[in-house]
Image: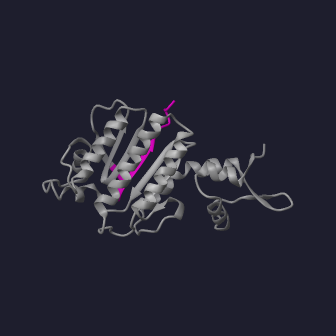
Amino acid sequence: MPSKLISIGKASKLLGVSIDSLRRWDKAHRLLSVRNGSRGHRYYRQTDIDVFLREIVTLVKQWALAETGITPEQDVYCQTRDIFQARLEKLQSSLQRAVSSSATSLLSAVAGEIGNNSFDHNLGNWPDITGIYFSYDLGNRVIVLADRGQGILATLKRVRPALTNDGDALKVAFTETISGRFPEARGNGLKFVRDVIVENPFTLDFETGNAHLFLKENDKEIIITPAEQHIKGCLAIIRFENLV
């Protein structure tokens, strides 16, 4: 059975990108359209859209793990905090149509905390690419953020010189309230993120350096495991698949 065709407008809404972006992706063969009708309007196969949506996590990991930093596509790149805040508001607006108002606020707050940490603690000291990668797929209920910054260990060593590895630094960031002063706020912000995740039907994969943390609802302990590959900065994958 042939795949259902959907309009470029509907595809734009499903993917959370502009129609102009879809046209650029078509020309670049990143996501091909199907021309239909006498005027050659662009349509998209539903199966192609479904496959593309599942790739959101793969794409952010490829960017975060790349040996050499490459500026991301415009639609997922927040070079400055102002751009990030504008796109965070767009996420919140989109979430309001997909989940409850309370979940919308919490998910936006978690994404905002993680994204703002990247700007707070790398300002003026970005190792290669300035800013963050920020994308989401509401169909598959996932939000992704990443930076190619200094990472949590370098951030916390400023106030905890005794920290020697990524795992210990990650655990401190998610469990200890250090202070309200820069640059210690990273620890406080991620503790807030932890509280939200364990009290709601969300999950969080968070990686920095060689350390990986997975959190889910009702988790009592923080368990750090080795990351499969070294992350130069931070990578966060927020899922809300079990949200009613």
Q: Is 33 or 183 nearer to us in this picture? A: 183
Q: Is residue 8 above or below residue 72?
A: above
Q: Is 207 or 82 nearer to us in this picture? A: 82
Q: How is the image coloured?
A: one colour
Q: Is residue 239 left or right of residue 220?
A: right
Whether the magenta-drawn stretch holds residue 235 is answered as yes
Q: Is residue 29 above or below residue 134?
A: below
Q: Is residue 33 above or below residue 5?
A: below
Q: Is residue 140 visible?
A: yes
> Percent x, y for residue 51?
61, 49
Query: Image point 69% across, 47% down: which residue?
Result: 46
Query: Image point 35% across, 37% down: which residue?
Result: 196
Magenta stretch: dominant secondary structure:
strand
Q: Is 238 or 12 nearer to us in this picture? A: 12
Query: Image point 27% across, 44% down: which residue?
Result: 174
Q: Is residue 79 left or right of residue 182?
A: right
> Percent x, y for residue 161?
13, 57
> Percent x, y for residue 238?
43, 44
Q: Is residue 136 left or right of residue 116?
A: right
- Extreme right residue here? 38
- Where is the N terminus found, in terms of image quarters? top right
> Percent x, y for residue 13?
63, 50
- Extreme left residue here? 162
Q: How many marks?
A: 0
Whether the magenta-drawn stretch holds residue 99 is answered as no
Q: Is residue 229 visible?
A: no
Query: Image point 37% across, 62% down: which residue?
Result: 148
Q: Which residues are magenta?
A: 227-244
